[in-house]
Image (spheres, helix red, strand yellow):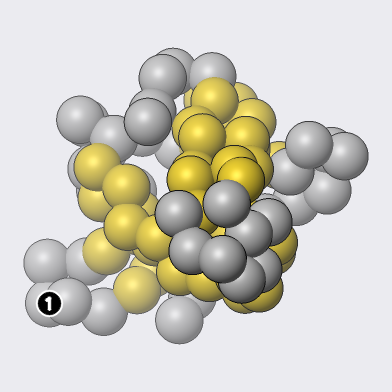
Amino acid sequence: SYSEDAITINNPNDYDLTDFQVKVYLGSPIEITIKDENGNPVPFCYKQPNGECGTNPTSTIWIKVPFIPANGQTTLEIKKGTNSAVNG
């Protein structure tokens, strides 16, 4: 689920997920930074019109979630105003 300041990613599997890619629709193209529960930066990119992953803001992002526990969830902090997206 997504709100303007956080996103919660659920893992219904009985095994941990590491560096798991998650697609998120933001609703509008905005510049953001994403951090994990410990304040560490989380890599993400904006899905470009050609299907590539880049730093130009669009309304859809791919997040590389560092860790989601088995049968659990991870919450990531989203801050507007600074673009920390990565290429590829």
Q: Is residue 25 left or right of residue 54?
A: left
- Which residue sits at x=24%, y=42%? 25
Position of 63 relative to 53 (above/below): above
Task: Tell which of 85 and 68 is nearer to you.
Answer: 68
- Which residue sits at x=49%, y=33%? 7
Dot 1 surroundings within 10 Å: few (below 14), some, or many (20 or more)? Answer: few
Please identify the quarter of the rendering in which residue 64 is found.
bottom right
**Percent coordinates x, y for residue 40 in the rendering:** 83, 48
Q: Is residue 35 left or right of residue 79?
A: right
**Percent coordinates x, y for residue 21 in the rendering:** 45, 69
Q: Is residue 53 left or right of residue 58?
A: right
What is the secondary structure assignment of the residue under circle 1?
Answer: loop
- Which residue sits at x=87%, y=39%? 38
Q: Which residue is mark 1?
A: 50
- Which residue sits at x=54%, y=25%? 6
Residue 4 visible, this orientation: yes
Furthest residue to the right? 38
Please identify the quarter of the rendering in which residue 75 is found.
top right
Please identify the quarter of the rendering in which residue 37 is found.
top right
Task: Tell which of 9 and 13 is nearer to you.
Answer: 13
Residue 43 visible, this orientation: no
Position of 5 relative to 12 (above/below): above
Mark 1 residue type:
Asn
**Percent coordinates x, y for residue 39 in the rendering:** 84, 38
> Is the C terminus in the top left, top right, bottom left or bottom right quadrant?
bottom left
Tally of numbered discs: 1
